[in-house]
């Protein structure tokens, strides 16, 4: 009885904190679970991307609908609608969308989570850009690498559907944005960055973080805009696996299985045209796959996931 009484008292305390706008006083893990209970019970199952009509699907990792809506028409013309994702995290999204075998799909992935989720064997072929094209200066795969590979693979497999999974706008932030004192560019270990907000001791301001995220989104859109002219016969859709939290509910990043609107409301955008001024793809650099020194794959994946902010 004492245990139940203690739990009841703790729950009442946490509810009082929420009511009084003192959500920061609730421990982070408990806060996350409280919002899981509130939102997951009412969230629908989300859209199955495999059942939709597309030839090439461009997945922007951690792309919020509201940020996309604010900037997409600087790059494209087309039809935008808001959909519900099947997950709030890449692993969840992958496992919920691709449980079977898809011999008609080639998957181009810049995100090591496709390896962790054990779904890579489900496709006709997977190109692991997180292994072939990882940039050690930026600790990510640059969007230009995904664009180039998408165009190459369409030429190689004209009759397959293609999924191209960009990392951006997911951190690290690759634009020329200084997030913390003494930092000369936007590259920062995003686990440390989000932890600094989570524990309230960060030097980075939320306004700067928002600007860095928006810059990352613009970086990836400028590269994605080079694809339609090369794939002019394809129906091309831009979407996202999940969104991102910037302090809503006192939470950050994108916890798995947390179906709040900011994480499961994502864009579904059919490209109908590209705005003038978009440059062509330059295949002079990085047009061929590179040989990678063989190291422990487990250690390699762990290190890359940590640089993307995932604790492994």
Image: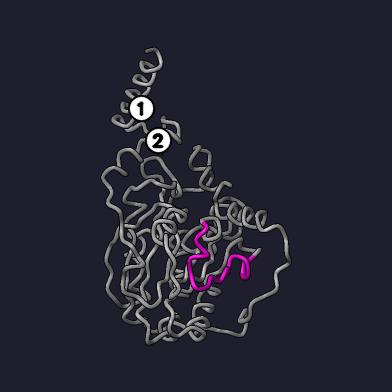
Q: Is residue 208 above or below residue 240?
A: above
| Cα distance in 3D space between marks 1 and 2 | 9 Å
Q: Is residue 237 shown above or below 36? A: below
Q: Nearer the viewer, residue 19 or 209?
A: 19
In percent of width and height, residue 129 lies at 58, 69
- Residue farthest top in this picture: 2
Q: Is residue 104 visible?
A: yes
Position of 212 compared to 292: left or right?
A: left
> The residue tagged with tag 1: helix, strand or loop?
helix
| Residue numbers of the magenta segment | 118-135
Q: Within the image, what quadrant is residue 174 found in?
A: bottom right
Q: How is the image coloured?
A: one colour
Rendered image: mark on residue 31: 2
Q: Residue at x 43, y 53 (%)?
A: 92
Query: Which residue in the protein does label 1 denote?
Result: 14
* Mark 2 crowd level (few <14, some 14–19, many ≥20, 10 Å Cα): some
Residue at (42%, 33%) from the top-left corner?
30
Q: Position of residue 139 (x, y in %)?
A: 61, 60
Where is residue 167 drawn, in percent x and y? 50, 63
Can see residue 222?
no
Residues at marks 1 and 2 touching, judged by CB atoms closer than 8 Å: yes
Q: Quadrant of residue 249?
A: top left
Residue drawn at (55%, 60%) of the image: 115
Q: Nearest the camera: 8 or 98?
A: 98
Which of the numbered marks, if any, corresponds to residue 290? none
């Amino acid at each position: 009885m004492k245990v139940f009484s203690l739990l009841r008292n703790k729950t009442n305390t946490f509810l009082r904190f929420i009511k009084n706008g003192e959500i920061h006083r609730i421990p982070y893990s408990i806060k996350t679970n409280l919002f899981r209970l509130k939102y997951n019970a009412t969230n629908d199952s989300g859209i199955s991307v495999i059942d939709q009509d597309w030839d090439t699907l461009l997945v922007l990792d951690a792309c919020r609908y509201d940020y996309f809506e604010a900037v997409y028409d600087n790059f494209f013309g087309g039809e935008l609608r808001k959909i519900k994702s099947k997950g709030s995290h890449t692993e969840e999204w992958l496992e919920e969308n691709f449980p079977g075998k898809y011999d008609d799909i080639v998957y181009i992935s810049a995100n090591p989570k496709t390896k962790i989720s054990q779904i890579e064997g489900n496709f006709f072929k997977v190109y692991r850009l997180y292994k072939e094209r990882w940039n050690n200066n930026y600790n990510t795969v640059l969007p230009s690498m995904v664009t180039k590979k998408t165009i190459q693979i369409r030429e190689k497999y004209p009759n397959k559907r293609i999924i191209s999974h960009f990392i951006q706008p997911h951190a690290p932030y690759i634009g020329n944005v200084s997030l913390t004192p003494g930092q000369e560019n936007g590259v920062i270990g995003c686990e440390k960055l989000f932890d600094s907000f989570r524990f309230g001791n960060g030097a980075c301001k939320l306004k700067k973080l928002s600007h860095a995220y928006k810059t990352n989104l613009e970086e990836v859109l400028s590269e994605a805009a080079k694809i339609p002219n090369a794939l002019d016969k394809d129906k091309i859709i831009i979407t996202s696996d999940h969104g991102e939290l910037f302090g809503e509910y006192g939470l950050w990043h994108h916890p798995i299985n947390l179906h709040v609107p900011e994480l499961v409301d994502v864009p579904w955008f059919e490209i109908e045209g590209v705005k003038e001024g978009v440059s062509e793809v330059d295949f002079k650099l990085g047009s061929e796959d590179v040989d990678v020194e063989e190291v422990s794959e487990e250690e390699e994946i762990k290190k890359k996931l940590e640089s993307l902010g995932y604790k492994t």
